[in-house]
């Protein structure tokens, strides 16, 4: 194997590792986004329950 | 070393790609840059004599030197005090290209030393060196433009200053005004792997790049200092008469390409590609390496951004949890 091929192989491995890491982070990102959304909805629900919106007096 | 005639004198220059002080006279102590020529001209004031040298495996600049009308790897010095082999002239059509040695990957350590000498020279010496390098093409009647390709802005300034001095000293002001100093952009440095690394593309020049493994092809046109590339889609034809250079990126040439020009043999390629082409695996390997490095950089950038975004999300979750707890506390306190 010549030097160039060795470099190419090493870069391929690095790319694979980075792609794996990216996929892992992307999955984590999805989970965190879902959690943020859920917390937001829970918080809204909590507010609505404790302090219901004022009704308009006619 | 016996120098019986010009032929043997020139051949002796390139044994092991090392200039063995054949030029100037043997015995004088000059730098001995390693060079990788395939075609060499012995330059005099009015004549030039060509020698073709067989390429070898490690020839980084041997790809397609024969496509140029002439290649000069040396020019005689008026003062005979410097080696000039560190510079290369290319002539393509009516244009001349003069390349700085730092752009020649094949130069070994001694060549680098020679280059440093050049750039470290005082202005008047630099002008003298420059004049020795450019006088021959300038005297040629077909000379229209001469490109001086440098890698750094400081080199560009040095050449400009030396040219200014030359304009005062020589009676060739009009010719000197045809010299263009090109600062080799990074992008060009990478892309030039497609072809001879020293030759910058000319305005409007088109490259066809075949990526055999990806089974894609790109047509890239050099416009105003950058390549404008378009990916060819299936069944599109390419008129080779409009292609100046061809690059094939692949480890092997065994898979047919769908919808793009396909050369089944080197002979077919030679026949059809009337302009210049490169099928040169060492170069293409480096091109592939460059592409992968770019991919690594992009991935690293994306990962960094994602990590930052995730950190922000975690902060947001933490804050939202705190607020939720506070809301509950307030609600309990108020019954």
Image (cartoon, rainbow, N blue to C red):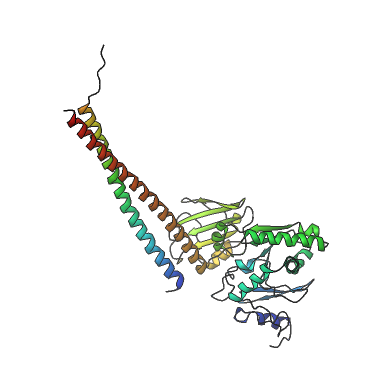
Q: Position of residue B60 (x, y in %)?
A: 56, 70
In the rendered image, which quarter is residue B151 located in? bottom right
Residue at the image position 25 percent from the left and 23 percent from the top: A53
Q: Position of residue B125 (x, y in %)?
A: 74, 69
Give the residue furthest to the front.
Answer: B333
In the rendered image, which quarter is residue B33 located in? bottom right
Q: Nearer the viewer, residue B228 or B189?
A: B189
Q: How many marks are shown on the rendered structure?
A: 0
Q: Position of residue B61 (x, y in %)?
A: 59, 70
Q: Is residue B177 above or below residue B90?
A: above
Q: Position of residue A18 (x, y in %)?
A: 36, 58
Q: Is residue B11 above or below residue A39?
A: below
Q: Nearer the viewer, residue B217 or B241?
A: B217
Give the residue furthest to the right.
Answer: B171
Give the residue furthest to the bottom.
Answer: B2
Give the residue furthest to the left.
Answer: B335
Question: Where, quadrant-wise, is the N terminus of chain B in this rendering?
Answer: bottom right
In the rendered image, which quarter is residue B324 located in? top left
Tell me: B327 left or right of B230. left
Question: Where, quadrant-wise, is the C terminus of chain B in this rendering?
Answer: top left
Residue B217 in view, yes or no = yes
Residue B88 in view, yes or no = no
Tell me: B158 left or right of B109. right
């Amino acid at each position: 194997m010549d030097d160039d091929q060795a470099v190419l192989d090493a870069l391929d491995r690095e790319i694979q590792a980075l792609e794996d890491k990216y996929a892992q982070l992307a999955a984590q990102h999805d989970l965190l986004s879902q959690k943020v959304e859920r917390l937001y909805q829970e918080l809204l629900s909590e507010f609505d329950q404790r302090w219901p919106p004022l009704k308009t007096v006619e | 070393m016996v120098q019986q005639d010009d032929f043997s004198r020139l051949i002796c220059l390139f044994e092991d790609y090392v200039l063995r002080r054949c030029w100037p006279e043997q015995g004088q102590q000059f730098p001995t840059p390693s060079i990788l020529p395939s075609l060499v001209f012995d330059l005099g004031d009015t004549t030039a004599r060509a020698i073709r040298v067989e390429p070898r495996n490690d020839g980084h600049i041997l790809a397609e030197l024969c496509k140029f009308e002439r290649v000069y790897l040396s020019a005689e010095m008026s003062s005979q005090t410097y080696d000039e082999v560190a510079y290369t002239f290319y002539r393509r059509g009516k244009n001349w290209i003069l390349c700085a040695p730092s752009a020649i990957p094949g130069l070994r350590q001694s060549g680098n030393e020679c280059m440093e000498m050049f750039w470290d020279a005082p202005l008047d010496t630099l002008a003298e060196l420059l004049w020795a390098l450019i006088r021959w093409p300038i005297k040629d009647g077909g000379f229209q433009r001469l490109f001086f390709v440098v890698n750094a802005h400081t080199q560009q300034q040095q050449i400009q200053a030396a040219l200014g001095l030359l304009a005062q000293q020589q009676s060739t002001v009009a010719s000197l005004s045809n010299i263009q100093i090109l600062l080799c952009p990074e992008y060009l440095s990478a892309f030039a792997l497609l072809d001879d690394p020293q030759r910058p593309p000319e305005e409007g020049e088109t490259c066809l790049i075949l990526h055999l493994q990806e089974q894609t092809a790109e047509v890239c046109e050099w416009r105003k200092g950058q390549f404008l590339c378009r990916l060819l889609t299936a069944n599109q034809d390419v008129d080779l008469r409009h292609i100046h250079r061809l690059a094939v990126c692949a480890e092997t040439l065994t898979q047919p390409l769908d919808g793009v020009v396909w050369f089944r043999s080197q002979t077919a390629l030679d026949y059809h590609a009337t302009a210049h082409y490169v099928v040169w695996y060492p170069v293409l390997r480096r091109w592939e390496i460059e592409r992968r490095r770019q991919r690594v950089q992009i991935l690293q950038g994306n990962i960094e951004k994602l990590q930052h975004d995730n950190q922000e999300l975690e902060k947001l979750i933490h804050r939202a949890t705190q607020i939720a707890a506070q809301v509950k506390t307030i609600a309990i306190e108020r019954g």
